[in-house]
Image: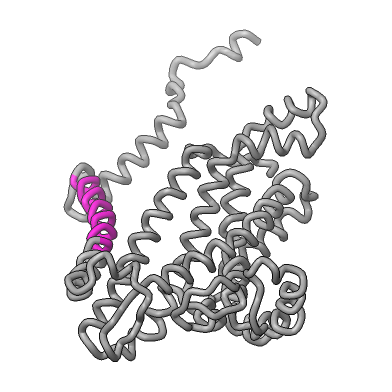
Amino acid sequence: MANAARPRPDMPAPQPVESTKVNDVSSDGKRAARLFGVSSEAGDQVFKFAMLLCGLAVLATLGLIVYELVLRSGPSWHAFGFKFFAARDWDPVNEKFGALPFVYGTLVSSLLALIIAVPLSIGVAVFTTEMCPPLLRGPLSFFVELLAAIPSVVYGLWAIFVMVPILSNYVEPFLSRTLGWTGFFVGPPYGISMLAAGIILAIMIVPIISSIAREVLMVVPQHQREAALALGATRWEMIRVGVLRNARAGIMGGIILGLGRALGETMAVTMVIGNRPEIAKSLFAPGYTMASVLANEFSEATGDLNLAALIEIGLALFLVTIVVNALARFLVWTVTRGQPSRSNA
């Protein structure tokens, strides 16, 4: 039996399978390189150069956008300087232009959207990662993220035909009776107002904030949850101390990213905000945003100074959006740092 198990001298020695596969792949690559008339090293260099061109193309496009905006807004810079963003008058006939009403409308509508959307978004993220049943987690996350795929004009149409009547008939009269003493809810309840713009923006940024918050919560180490529960913490205490506290920088990054979306939103806000360049304390009053004035007046502007003023508004909005998104990405990175999500979340 021992002789039968011993290999015969005339039998060839077994070859490593992995080495054979590697050699086959290497020979296939060399064969393909010879077929196209290039060496493998030259192919790597061509691929590296092509990818470098792709990256530089993005940077070149960004640089060309900034260059064109700065060049076209030059007459407005020379005529008004930085006072352009502190003046209130917007009179194309007399060539008096001030962007303060548009800056005010953009900030108020965006901050109102954050006040409404942040608690809802964090609640959705916490529920889907910590408390949601496994069978419901996938569909719920899908439908929340589906809100981000709806075109903004569809949001605007829904707001005009559904949300605005509800606001004018029920919500705004109730707010006027109960909170009118604050001065933020006074005036005729037309529905088309800064409040409507803030609500529609809140609906649009909920999927952005909730999806980022969910990803940040999923990279919090599982042992922190288990340690909090082992020390006798309730589920709420575990989420508040062991999860939310460790993910607060990333959640703040998601909030700022949602703010960047709210600052640049155009069509839905234009359809419900009223488009009147004024500064009013009441949220029932109409307003104007920087993106809305570009959408409404750019095609009708005739004078060079009017066009330059609109382009200067676009430049300011562009720069603010870049800064806000960069800050948001940095805050998210401080928490995730490229870590994979929990497989069970």
| Residue 111: image location, x then y, percent | 55, 61
Residue stretch rendered in magenta on the structure: 42-62
Q: Residue at x 54, y 76 (%)?
A: 151
In this picture, residue 316 sits left or right of residue 45: right
Q: In the rendered view, does 136 fall on the left or right side of 30?
A: right
Residue at the image point whose x is 73% and y is 72% from the top: 175
Depth order, front residue of 271/335: 271
93 relative to 115, above or below = below
- Numbered circles on residues, count: 0
Q: Is residue 117 above or below residue 251?
A: below
Residue 165 vertical placement versus 218 (above, below): below
Q: Estimate the x, y position of residue 335 in percent, counting from the top left.
A: 52, 38
The quadrant in which the C terminus is found is: top right
Q: Position of residue 134 (x, y in %)?
A: 77, 49
Q: Quadrant of the N terminus?
A: top right
**Taking 9 as reference, is 90 left or right?**
left
* Rendered image quadrant of residue 283: bottom right
| Residue with the most extreme front position | 181
Q: Position of residue 125 (x, y in %)?
A: 67, 51
- Look at 48% across and 83% down and name the residue there: 275
In reply to whether residue 44 is colored magenta, the answer given is yes
